[in-house]
Image (cartoon, rainbow, N blue to C red):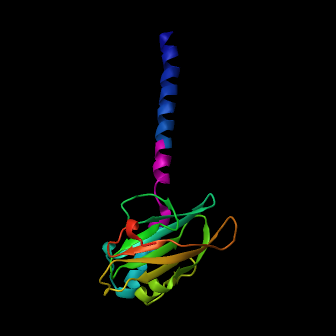
Amino acid sequence: MKSLRLKPLVLIFSLSFIACQEDTFNQSNESIDEDMIDATLLAEEYLESEKGRFNDSDKAITVLRYRNGKLYFDTNTDDHKGYQEVEETSVTANVEPGDYIFWFAGGGLSEVDDIDFDEQAEEVLGDLPVDFIPQKMWVVRVPTELDSPQMLKYDIVYVPRESGIQVRLDPKIAVGGQSNDDSGD
């Protein structure tokens, strides 16, 4: 009789254990950032086509996502992992002279219409960002001859899927080791 009571308990325990394992598997799959993977592959494709080479240390990739009425970013150049809200004081990339900067329209965005630098940043950069993949990925190269830290201001002009209305936000890029604290606003 005890054997009959034990079998259902073992079965329930086994099913619960399997269900927990499946939940853990699904959670780990959700932590994979498909947008960052796609953006990295496209950045490498761009660098191979332009220069015949690429190096992980010479590209800053910023993935943009829209969710719950806000624009978020994650970058491969920041020690902080995970998406952060884009604000006026946000530094979306920390780069060195000679680096390439990429912006990628990820989840929740129908397009990124423009990466629009202010006049001072245009003087520093010379070339304006290129729309490498129309409304999906932008790229610019920081000149190699910069000799002092710079904080470059720019606007991200984007269209969320949910509203279809164009929005403009103005974060920054730190070049040459300048931190977020000394932005000079």
Residue 44, picture quadrant: bottom left
Residue 9 sits above or below residue 92 on the image: above
User: Looking at the image, how many numbered discs can be counted on the residues?
Assistant: 0
Left or right: 144 in relation to 102: left
Residue 6 placement (x, y as % from top left):
48, 17
Residue 50 sits above or below residue 23 on the image: below
Left or right: 46 in relation to 156: left
User: Was residue 155 drawn as part of the magenta stretch in this picture?
Assistant: no
> In this orientation, which residue lies closer to the viewer: 139 or 167?
167
Q: Residue at x 35, y 72 (%)?
A: 178
Q: Residue at x 49, y 63 (%)?
A: 34
Residue 101 sits above or below residue 28 on the image: below
Inspect this view and state whether residue 40 appears: no
Q: Residue at x 47, y 66 (%)?
A: 90
User: Was residue 34 drawn as part of the magenta stretch in this picture?
Assistant: yes
Q: Read off the magenta span.
A: 24-37
| Most common SS among magenta residues | helix
Inspect this view and state whether residue 94 appears: yes
Residue 25 sits above or below residue 139 on the image: above
